[in-house]
Image (spheres, grey):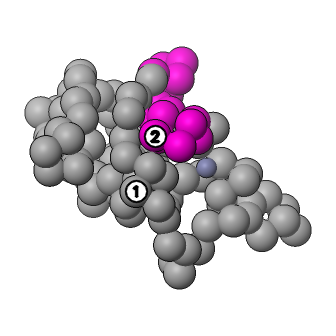
Amino acid sequence: MADVFHRPTGWRILAERRVFEMTWDDAQVSEYAWEPFRRACPCAYCAGEGAYKGNVSADTTFTEKQTELKEVYAVGRYGLTPEWDDGHDTGIYTFKMLRRAAGLE
Ligand SMILES: [Zn+2]
């Protein structure tokens, strides 16, 4: 079976539930709770790069601002970048990674 590349048809921030919701081109809907979503930030500062360890681990305690999702921007045709309330906006989450995190093919 071919590796089908799915794209979202839309997404929205559900502030009352502190959840980020994505709707996909195969009609699947996935939800990401803000805190684990921030913890999974793949940027070099958070996740590290090469020998550099990064500043975020499973034990990191976040401030409220750090897990407050303000806005989400499209990055090219392959991913998105969340902007957090502390100004952090360097993480690029690919659609592939988001599908996988939601347990979708
Ligand atoms: Zn980051």
Mark 2 or mark 1: whose residue is earlier in sequence: 1
Dots 2, 1 in contact, CB < 8 A:
yes
22 sits left or right of 91 in the view? left
Element type at mark 2: loop
Q: Residue at x 73, y 64 (%)?
A: 54
Q: Position of residue 99 (x, y in %)?
A: 34, 47
The kind of residue tagged 1 is Glu
Per the model, the C-alpha gap separating discs 2 and 1 is: 8 Å
Q: Residues within 10 Å of mark 2 (few under 14, many from 20)?
A: some
The answer to whether residue 3 is visible is no
The answer to whether residue 7 is visible is yes
Q: Residue at x 23, y 50 (%)?
A: 18
Q: Position of residue 105 (x, y in %)?
A: 30, 51
Magenta range is 74-89
Q: Residue at x 65, y 58 (%)?
A: 46
Q: Residues within 10 Å of mark 1 (few under 14, many from 20)?
A: few
Residue placed under numbered mark 1 in the picture: 64
38 sits left or right of 21 in the view? right
Hey, which quadrant is residue 5 in on the image? top left
Task: Classify 9 as above or below 94.
Answer: above
Q: Position of residue 101 (x, y in %)?
A: 36, 57
23 sits left or right of 46 in the view? left
The kind of residue tagged 2 is Asp
Q: Residue at x 14, y 50 (%)?
A: 17
Residue placed under numbered mark 2 in the picture: 85
Question: Which disc is residue 36 wearing?
Answer: none
Whether the magenta-drawn stretch holds residue 85 is answered as yes
Whether the magenta-drawn stretch holds residue 57 is answered as no
